[in-house]
Amino acid sequence: MPPPAGASTEDDAVVSVAAGATATSEPDAGDPELQRKKGRRKKKRRPRAPTEEEVAARRFVLRWACPGREAPSDEEQAGMARVRRPRVAVELHAHSARSDGSLSPAELVERSHRNGVKVFALTDHDTMAGIQEAMEAAKQYPIRIIPGVEISAVHSPRGSEPTGESVVQLVCQTGGVAVLAHPWALKNPGAVIKNLKAAGLHGIEVYRSDGKVSGLSDLADTYELLKLGGSDFHGRDDKEEPDVGSVDLPVLAILKFLEIAKPIWHNATKEIFSGISERTTGLNGSKGFRRISSAGDFSLLRISSEDPELTDAPEVEVLRTEVADIVLTRQ
């Protein structure tokens, strides 16, 4: 039976669709301008070559993070020219099982190394109990540990909880670098950051795994603060959680951080060693205790004497322990 009037057979329908597709694309074929636009869309952008400043910053950071490392080879330099900018994997915000993370400090350091991290800060909540384990574990890898802590605070005084201003002042008084974590969670970040800056704040988190938070970057510029960031890794069974070292922190931001932090760390450690040096003066009439260097990242203290009874004294053992702790946590 023939189809009703106005209807088409299956073959007619196929032909109509095909003809329609051809008709839709046909005007482009003879239009040179449209063809040029298509060609431009297909071209891939060439990566921006790193600046001399970025290459020099990367070299400086790597030498600090991995003492003894040679300057980048020709192959490394060529590799850097093929990327958008030279990168050093740095993790400045991560948690271990010593607070609410799932990995031990040693496991976290190992994971950081596997991910190519060269500078790692353990920042457990309200405790530094995992720092020693992390630093011991890091001796196996070319990775620099920065002792850290994420201290809980409130903006407005409430009960016995510390305020943000008091925490910032404490960090500054003890030779630390004060950085505001999670500023995007604040209802009024501008007012909070202004008050914390007056208390001595050095920087704020601006970079996250999903990129840079532009509004916070502007606030950092306004108050002349360091622009930092980290993954906030906890090791949860969550595929969406950013991994250690995943935040793309610009190498120039890392360099600025070190330019601020290293003098702070050096001066704080120098004061501690100077205090210990003063305590050794006159210890059992000793003349064998003296500060021998204040160069580099921290001062050195010689605890030695030709008198074996003196070097084995209980007071000296206490000082040795204190110095070992300082070198461990202040490098």
Image: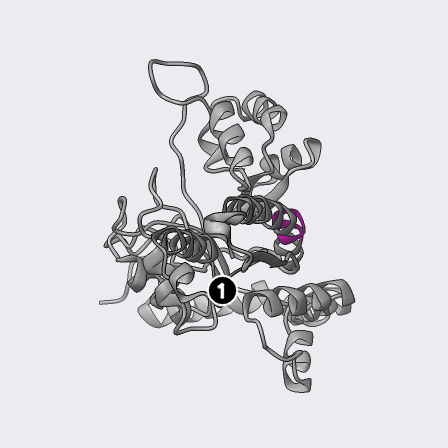
Amino acid of disc 1? Ser
Q: In the figure, residue 204 lies in which quadrant?
A: top right
279 and 122: which is toward the camera: 279
Residue lying at 64% horizontally and 67% vertically, measured from the top left: 86
Q: Quadrant of the N terminus?
A: bottom left
Residue 68 lies, in percent from the top left, at 59, 76
38 and 249: which is toward the camera: 249
Residue 43 lies, in percent from the top left, at 67, 71
Residue 197 lies, in percent from the top left, at 61, 28
Assign a secondary structure to mark 1.
Answer: loop
Does the segment drawn in magenta span residue 258?
yes
Report the side of 199 relative to 123 (left or right).
Answer: right
Residue lying at 49% horizontally and 64% vertically, measured from the top left: 305
- Residue stretch in magenta: 256-261
230 and 65: which is toward the camera: 65
55 and 287: which is toward the camera: 287
Residue 228 in view: yes
Residue 19 lies, in percent from the top left, at 50, 69
Q: Does residue 42 lie above or below 331 as drawn?
A: below
Residue 7 in view: no
SS assignment for the magenta stretch, majority: helix
Residue lying at 24% horizontally and 53% vertically, measured from the top left: 102
Label 1 Cα neighbours within 10 Å, binned few <14 / some 14-19 / many ≥20:
some
* Coloring scheme used: one colour
Which residue is tagged 1? 305
Does the segment drawn in magenta span residue 25?
no
How many numbered discs sit on the rendered protein? 1
